[in-house]
Image (tube, rainbow, N blue to C red):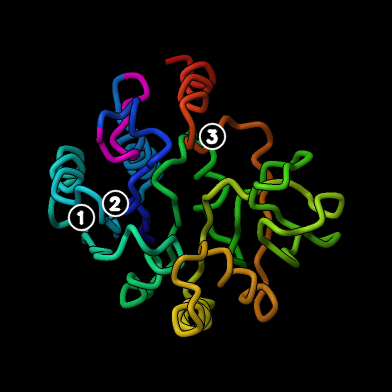
């Protein structure tokens, strides 16, 4: 199993605080967000990484290699990072869809306990779900009585949603050909500036993806300055 981390974006809403640093390199406590992610992966036995870079890619490469060596990581460049989104960035990694992988957005801070929920053997691909009442702008998930994901996206009826997708998932090798097909479809039909959940929403019509609850384990997506302050409080940093 490997980890695919999408870290190509600028993080415009945090530029004043980050002083131009990529968002993934902002420190929470003694470590950056992406270092926290890598450390959590290593602690659960994930030692191979595919990292998509764009904004200040050389700076992030050097930063990542402070934690792992060159044999453990492949850097994939998104040269149009300022015109595309996570669907396109993940599509760029499709040649590495040769084994199960854990997916991260590079702005998610979490405890390694969350990875332990999905790295163990299971029959299905899985997305981590924070069970809660959702707001309109959040990526939401609708599930059935067996926790199978029926729909995922921002523009869903909040009354039907079980909660928010927190930006971490496991995709098993058996679904990857179909997943790559839907990522390709997204690129071919002008969805390159869309989120990768566009392809996942097509995928769930064909294969079983399960929602795994976070059960209150701390996790936060860091988009705004107030998210940084909340992250420090949540993780006692």
* Residue 139 pos. (x, y %): 64, 52
Residue pictured at 76% horizontal, 58% vertical: 156
Secondary structure category for the residue under label 3: strand
Judged by depth in the image, the label closer to the viewer, 1 or 3, is 3
Location of residue 13 by image quarter: top left
Residue pictured at 53% horizontal, 55% vertical: 169
Given contact means CB atoms under 8 Å apart, are the residues at marks 3 and 2 in contact?
no
Q: Quadrant of the C terminus?
A: top left
Relative height, residue 123 to residue 169 (above, below) = below
Q: Tag 3: Cα neighbours inside 10 Å, few (<14), some, or many (≥20)? A: some
Residue pictured at 50% horizontal, 73% vertical: 191
* Residue 194 pos. (x, y %): 51, 65
Tell me which label, 1 or 3, sits earlier in the chain: 1
Please give left or right for residue 20 compared with residue 91 in the image. Answer: left
- To which residue does mark 2 refer? 47
- Residue 27 in magenta stretch: yes
Q: Tag 2: Cα neighbours inside 10 Å, few (<14), some, or many (≥20)? A: some
Given contact means CB atoms under 8 Å apart, are the residues at marks 1 and 3 in contact?
no
Tell me which label, 3 or 2, sits earlier in the chain: 2
Judged by depth in the image, the label closer to the viewer, 3 or 2, is 3
Given contact means CB atoms under 8 Å apart, are the residues at marks 2 and 1 in contact?
yes
The disc at residue 72 is: 1
Please give left or right for residue 139 compared with residue 131 in the image. Answer: left
Secondary structure category for the residue under label 1: helix
Relative height, residue 19 to residue 117 (above, below) = above
Distance CA(mark 2)–CA(mark 1): 6 Å
Location of residue 63 by image quarter: top left
* Residue 129 pos. (x, y %): 66, 47
* Residue 130 pos. (x, y %): 67, 42
Residue pictured at 58% horizontal, 69% vertical: 198
User: Which segment is the magenta one?
Assistant: 20-29
Tell me which label, 2 or 1, sits earlier in the chain: 2
């Amino acid at each position: 199993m490997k980890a695919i981390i999408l870290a190509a974006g600028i993080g415009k809403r945090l530029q004043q605080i980050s002083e131009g640093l990529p968002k993934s390199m902002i420190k929470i406590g003694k470590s950056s967000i992406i270092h926290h992610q890598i450390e959590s992966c290593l602690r659960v036995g994930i030692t191979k990484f595919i990292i998509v870079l764009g904004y200040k890619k050389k700076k992030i490469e050097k930063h990542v290699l402070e934690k792992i060596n060159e044999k453990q990581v492949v850097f994939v460049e998104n040269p149009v990072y300022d015109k595309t989104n996570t669907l396109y960035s993940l599509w760029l990694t499709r040649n590495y869809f040769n084994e199960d992988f854990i997916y991260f957005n590079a702005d998610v801070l979490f405890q390694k306990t969350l990875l332990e929920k999905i790295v163990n053997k299971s029959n299905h691909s899985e997305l981590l779900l924070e069970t809660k009442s959702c707001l309109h702008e959040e990526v939401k998930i609708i599930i059935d009585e067996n926790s199978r994901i029926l729909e995922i996206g921002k523009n869903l009826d909040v009354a039907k949603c079980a909660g928010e997708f927190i930006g971490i998932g496991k995709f098993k090798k058996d679904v990857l050909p179909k997943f790559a097909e839907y990522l390709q479809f997204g690129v071919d039909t002008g969805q390159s500036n869309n989120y990768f959940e566009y392809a996942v929403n097509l995928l769930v019509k064909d294969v079983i993806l399960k929602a795994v609850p976070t059960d209150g384990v701390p996790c936060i997506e860091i988009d705004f300055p107030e998210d940084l302050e909340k992250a420090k409080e949540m993780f006692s940093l």
